[in-house]
Amino acid sequence: MKLSESPIPEHTRDGVPRHVALIMDGNGRWAQRRSLPRSAGHWQGVEAVRRTVKAASELGIEYLTLYSFSSENWARPPSEVDYLLNLLRRFIHQDVAELHSSGVKIVVIGQRDDLEPDLRELIEQSERLTAQNDRLTLVVAFNYGSRDEIVRAARAMAEAVAEGRLDPDDITGEMVHDYLDTKGIPDPDLVIRTSGEQRLSNFLLWQSAYAEFVFVEEHWPDFDRESLERALSQYSNRDRRFGRLAATAGG
């Protein structure tokens, strides 16, 4: 997954969102339509990840967040869960070194306490290795659920108040953000969901308050650079007002 080594031309940043978040949906349906096992859809989904990371970097996107494994996915059959966990292990072993050489910083958000020790160590190694890179920040939401994230943030703030380290009157939206897993990461400008579904599924609920949404029909294994560019084209035609009046409106 070698990324272009050339600097990103400034003009490619015009109209390009700084942060794109992706709900990668449809691996199982992609496989079912081809009379293949669900594992085949997940395998091809990793190829779509490689294509999308490369395209995002070349298009000048600074942050790309991928919803790879939700906290609800543990309810899937154990064989499928094991396959998904091993896919992550394989991805780290095969791709992280190349991502590092291409200037990609890896950040993983979500609960880690209940992960197997070897997987947790692989994640932490990847983050340490790539921590100083600045071409693209790849945020992987793994064992992640936004409600759980908000509950953990609220608990941490409550503990700080109880210990006298925080005054409740000083709590602001900006402070809440600093207690979330995404501390230091800008909110997504654009959220894309594949496979035609139109819901957030417990993904970045706080952070997506003012994001634009694009829902595409392709199942995730079919998502490619052209799919991303079409979504970016829709985004570029949106009028983002953040609660304010449109520029053409009176008053």
Image: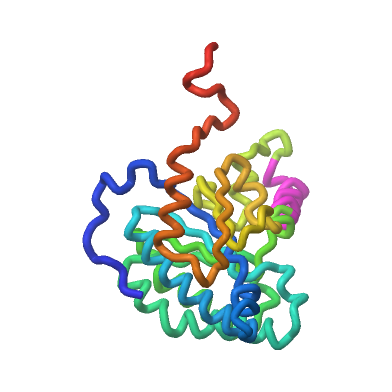
**In the image, is 8 to the left or to the right of 150?**
left
State the image coordinates of residue 244 (x, y, percent, origin top left). Answer: 56, 25
| Number of callouts | 0
**Left or right: where 186 falls relative to 37:** left
Residue at x-position 68% and y-position 74%:
113
In the picture shown, does residue 209 fall above or below 119? above
Which region is colored magenta? Answer: 151-166
Report the front residue among 140 and 129.
140
Q: Quarter of the image for the N terminus: give it.
A: bottom left
Furthest toward the bottom, the residue is 79
The structure residue drawn at horizontal position 33% and vertical position 66%, both measured from the top left corner, is: 103
Closer-to-camera residue (221/12): 221
Front residue of 117/94: it is 94
Residue 94 screen position, x and y as percent = 42, 84
Residue 13 position (above or below residue 82) = above
Query: In the image, what residue occupies the spot 60% across and 48% down?
Result: 207
User: Quadrant of the image for the C terminus?
Assistant: top right
Can you give x and y, in whole percent of width and height, for residue 241 in the image? 53, 30
What is the residue that sits farthest to the top in this orientation?
251
Question: Looking at this rendering, what residue extends furthest in the left direction?
Answer: 6
Q: In the image, what residue occupies the spot 52% across and 23% down?
A: 246
Magenta-drawn stretch, dominant element (helix, strand or loop): helix
**Relative to 176, residue 149 above or below:** below
Give the left or right position of residue 220, taking residue 115 as reference: left
Residue 49 magenta: no
Q: Quadrant of residue 182?
A: bottom right
Residue 176: % across, % down: 65, 45
Q: How is the image coloured?
A: rainbow
